[in-house]
Amino acid sequence: MASMFDLIRSNKRNSFLLMSFFVLIFAAMGYLVAYLYNDYFWFGFFLVVAFLITFFAYQYSDSIVLKLSLAKPVTEQENPYLYNVIDGLAIAAGIPAPRAYIIEDGAPNAFATGRDPKHAVICVTTGLLEKMNRLELEGVIAHEMSHIKNYDIRFMTMVTVLVGTVALLSDWLRRSFFWGGGRRSSRRVATKGPAALIFVALAILAAVLAPLLAKLIQLAISRQREYLADASGAILTRYPEGLASALEKITADTEPLEVANKATEHLYIVNPLIEHRSMLNNLFSTHPPAEERIRRLRSM
């Protein structure tokens, strides 16, 4: 069985692989645009943009996520109760205390973001603070603290920015080819013979499938990390029932989280998009079924 240190190394390695994959996707799409328009300036342009976006995603993806979520920083003087919970669990986890942010929303939920434990944030909704008792809040914060300690936050936050950018780019590329320069590029490709036509067809197919690939990446990275963070959080609090009870309350709550969207849904402790909580959608959800998570916690 892999140790915690093995899992941390794996998350760091996966972050590098994700950045490399993103650059390769951008380069491939840049080559397609350059080929279709017979101007290889576009290939270099896409490469430069890919490296710039990758750099900014690594450095500032947490800020982007917080802005998307309309989260605001909160001081210890403003909310000593939240800071007391965070500080105590940070000491137990052996990491610096993360900064605290709050989303003004009645739906109970939380997420962690940042690039490493020294630059981490825990964000909770006002609904979570109002609807959880002390033990339940500790369970949720411990879960997010585990994401920070395991370096899940870097990988999961970068996915939000990089995969979302790939999906937007693929959509632009499809529109550009079919509605913009499609006729010009089609005539040019036709003069190059069947091989060129096959190449372009495969490239367009890749652009069409990019959003699906983005979703599969989110599924692959999220589910096992949630189980691991549940178990690690329960170890931190020494009370699995606190997190199990919190998950029950969050799942049963029907108030929608207004700021949540498909780009950020995988960051939250429970999928905030209400329509994804049904059994029919469990197969395509970024989170494992809440019932299974609760069962595992109560069997610890």
Image (cartoon, rainbow, N blue to C red):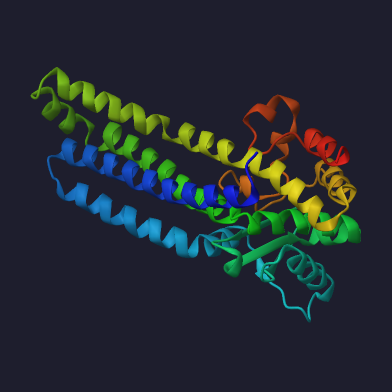
In the displayed image of the protein, which residue is found farthest to the top? Answer: 194
Q: Residue at x 52, y 33 (%)?
A: 216
Query: What is the quadrant of residue 237 in the picture?
Result: bottom right
In the displayed image of the protein, which residue is found farthest to the left? Answer: 191
Please name whichever residue, 52 or 223, is drawn nearer the observer in this view of the structure. Answer: 223
Q: Residue at x 22, y 26 (%)?
A: 199
Residue 205's spot in the image, x, y percent? 34, 26
Residue 30's spot in the image, x, y percent? 25, 43
Residue 132's spot in the image, x, y percent? 88, 56
State which quarter of the image contains the N terminus. Answer: top right
Query: What is the quadrant of residue 183 in the picture?
Result: top left
State which quarter of the image contains the C terminus. Answer: top right
Q: Residue at x 77, y 59 (%)?
A: 141
Query: Taking 150 as reference, is 235 left or right?
Result: right
Residue 164 visible in rendering: no
Vertical placement of residue 169 versus 115, above or below: above
Vertical placement of residue 139 versus 29, above or below: below
Q: Residue at x 76, y 46 (%)?
A: 231
Residue 98's spot in the image, x, y percent? 67, 69
Please name whichever residue, 74 or 295, is drawn nearer the observer in this view of the structure. Answer: 295
